[in-house]
Image (cartoon, rainbow, N blue to C red):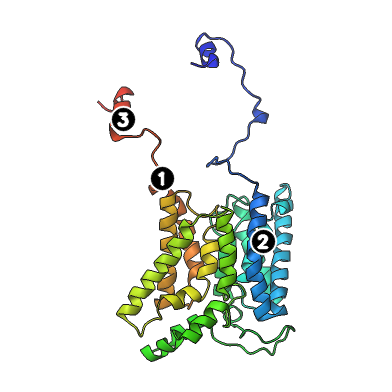
Amino acid sequence: MPEEMKEAEKGEKVLLPEPSQLLLSASPHVQAPGSVADIMRKVLICLMPACAAGVAFFGLNALRIIVLTTAFCLIFEWLCCLIARRPSTLGDWSAAVTGVLLALNLPPGVPWWICMIGAFIAIAAAKAVFGGLGQNPFNPAAVARVALLVGFAEPMTTFYKPLQGFLPSSDFVTGATPLALAKAAETAEEIGLLESAEKLAGGFFGFTGGSIGETCVPAILIGGIVLLFLRVISWHIPCAMLGTAFFFTWIVHLAQPALTPGPLFHLCSGGLMLGAFFMATDMVTSPITVRGKLIFGASIALIACVIRIWGAYPEGVSFAIVIMNALVPLIDRFSHKHPFGWHPANVQRYAMRRGEVK
């Protein structure tokens, strides 16, 4: 028995620390190597290949949006800390990561005010009102994209064809994304054209319309693999998402070839890759157990595929992430691990010893 407890039993005075020296915070109390700023810097660096690919395919329009959303997120982060009378959190780089992720989820032709509204929703409405980083239940970039898509459908669904030059211009040619074409297809022949080797290669390497950071799969994979190698994220959520999407779309396509393309098309189209590696893996808004992560990733993929195939929108990854973010506490509750030494017989024995069960 510790000496402090023996002294307490004897009635002697036990010295306790000053209340002002104690830090009261919400669980879980987990110590991880590296600071928040270190982790966010690594995520930001791993997003650079997707940013570079977006600028290469969509020109200075993409660069403009990346700069604007990042700047607006930093400004709103500073203002929220000022209003809440909290120390500035610009140094943890989380606002910069949110700004870059938001930009990668936007079409390359959106006006500046869309960037400002999206940054306000991501920082103020989706993070600051809940207490800041670590307290937000929803992924800020996903919330901003969903809100912008619902509130400003026209600019959010107007996509440019890639490789039209590097000068900002309003004369660029727009075109439908592969997911929009798949939604509009009515016959198995039209679906088959979308699955041709040329179309799949174009979707994989980025020669297609879409949001700034979701069209070039190799660029996303490079950043995602580096995140895995650095152990910033684990493999469970990305593998659960991509594996579930693959098998679900394969089964649906096998049953109804005229309804939707096969799994390779879905893996190379839209924001599935970006969401799997950079958004769903957000450590604040994802489960903490291995079983919970697998359930979380698989559920996101199922919801996203259902929206893609039968929903009103061609894309559903952001919607699925926000929906599953709301269910993370429930997933953690039912996927928690038992303490070491736990056994039903021990629980019954301890309950009888305490008099709770006769």
Element class at badge 3: helix
Q: How crowded is mark 1: few (under 14 residues within 10 Å), some or many (20 or more)?
A: some
Mark 2, mark 1: which one is toward the viewer? 2
Q: Where is residue 61 in the image (x, y as percent from the top left)?
A: 70, 79
Compared across the picture, whether 223 is left or right of 178 comes to right
On the image, the x and y values in percent for residue 307 come to 43, 73
Q: How far apart are marks 1 and 3 (CA)?
A: 18 Å
Which kind of residue does numbered mark 3 sit on? Answer: Asn
Q: Residues within 10 Å of mark 2 (few under 14, many from 20)?
A: some
Residue pointed to by mark 3: 346
Between 154 and 268, the one nearer to me in the picture: 268
Residue of label 2? 45
Q: How crowded is mark 3: few (under 14 residues within 10 Å), some or many (20 or more)?
A: few
Which mark is first along the chain, 1 or 2? 2
Q: Nearer the viewer, mark 2 or mark 3?
A: 2
Question: Is residue 342 something one can see in this rendering?
Answer: yes
Which residue in the protein does label 1 denote? 336
Please tell me in which quadrant of the rendered image residue 258 appears. Answer: bottom left
